[in-house]
């Protein structure tokens, strides 16, 4: 069997031995959104450290556990802390959690992150519905022998972020009175922030926001047939657009400041997405 798939199956066995909860939707929580779980009716939690072979998150402020429970009555699994490529894991390991949540039964992947705003119309604290992404700066998570059990060798990426879910989320935001920008997310490897020249170049390529996660998770999820959506919290203006040097502290402070609104938007969107399922 394919080594990447073998590891995934082992992780899934470890989860299945401990957890009985069946999630309908998988939610990956970005910087500042970790406390989303406080709004959930939590049934079970599983620290990543209890899953043999699971990559460990090393970023300060990232908790590192799966949280299983209900959000507005919808059964979900939330990742409190994600794994980043810049932590040094092979890209296939970085998307292992996404694939694992697919094996747990989640049909939908809801991605959130903190991102730098490239679009000059954006402000720190805005939310951006991800309409598409540019992932050419990071190796594809699908490199290596294809896992036929998950998906096809050459998967289509013409609608990574589901048009159907985007419409629902736009309506959820309007109903909650939360302004929502929309745009293209570009993923870099990180961990350094970008130079002003890079940001100008990414803007010309068509990117509206930049971050160090998300696009590869979205690709892995599409490969295995999940329906995907995502929202970025614009935690800062990207390098050169902002007059100030960038810092993780600023990213976290802005994300924390708007977290209550972000929580409300995400909870409403999840409920609207799964309504009637
Ligand atoms: N660049 C890259 N990643 C980020 C940024 C940024 O400006 N802000 C939050 N994550």
Image (cartoon, rainbow, N blue to C red):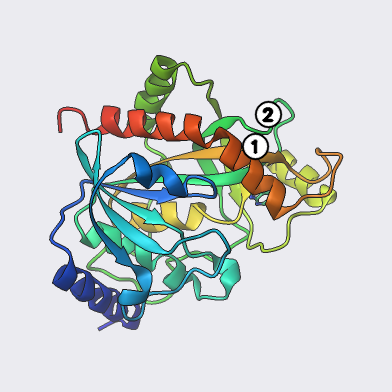
The answer to whether the residue labelled 2 contacts the one labelled 1, judged by CB atoms less than 8 Å apart, is: yes
Mark 2 secondary-structure assignment: loop
Comparing 19 with 172, the one in front is 19
Is residue 19 in sight in this rendering? yes
**Residue depicted at 57% across the width and 65% down the height:** 59
Residue 47: x and y in percent read: 34, 68
Ligand 1 has an atom within 8 Å of the beta carbon of the residue at disc 1: no
At 42% from the left and 29% from the top, the residue drawn is 265
Residue 152 seen in the current view: no
Q: In the rendering, which numbered label is found on residue 122?
A: 2
Q: In this rendering, would 173 be left or right of 187?
A: left
Numbered label attached to residue 29: none
What is the residue that sits farthest to the right in this orientation? 243
- Please tell me whether residue 131 is drawn above or below residue 253 in the rendered image: above
Q: Please identify the quarter of the rendering in which residue 5 is found.
A: bottom left
Q: Residues within 10 Å of mark 1 (few under 14, many from 20)?
A: many
């Amino acid at each position: 069997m394919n080594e990447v798939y073998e590891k995934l199956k082992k992780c899934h066995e470890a989860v299945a031995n401990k957890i009985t909860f069946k999630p309908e939707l998988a939610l990956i929580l970005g910087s500042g959104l970790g406390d989303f779980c406080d709004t959930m009716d939590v049934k079970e939690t599983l620290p990543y450290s209890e899953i043999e072979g699971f990559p460990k998150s090393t970023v300060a402020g990232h908790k590192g556990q799966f949280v299983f429970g209900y959000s507005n009555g919808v059964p979900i699994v939330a990742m409190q802390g994600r794994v980043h490529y810049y932590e040094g894991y092979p890209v296939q390991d970085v998307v292992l959690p996404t694939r694992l949540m697919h094996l747990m039964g989640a049909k939908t992947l809801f991605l959130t992150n903190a991102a730098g705003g490239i679009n000059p119309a954006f402000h720190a604290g805005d939310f951006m519905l991800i309409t598409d992404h540019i992932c050419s700066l990071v190796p594809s998570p699908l490199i290596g022998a294809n896992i036929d059990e998950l998906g096809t060798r050459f998967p289509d990426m013409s609608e990574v972020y589901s048009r159907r879910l985007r419409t629902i989320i736009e309506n959820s935001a309007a109903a909650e009175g939360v302004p929502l920008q929309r745009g293209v997310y570009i993923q870099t490897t990180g961990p350094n922030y970008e130079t002003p020249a890079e940001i100008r170049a990414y803007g010309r390529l068509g990117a509206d926001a930049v971050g160090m996660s998300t696009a590869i998770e979205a690709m892995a999820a599409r490969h295995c047939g999940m329906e995907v959506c995502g929202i970025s919290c614009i935690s800062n203006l990207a390098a050169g657009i902002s007059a100030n040097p960038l810092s993780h502290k600023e990213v976290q402070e802005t994300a924390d400041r708007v977290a209550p609104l972000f929580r409300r938007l995400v909870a409403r969107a999840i409920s609207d997405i799964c309504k009637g399922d």
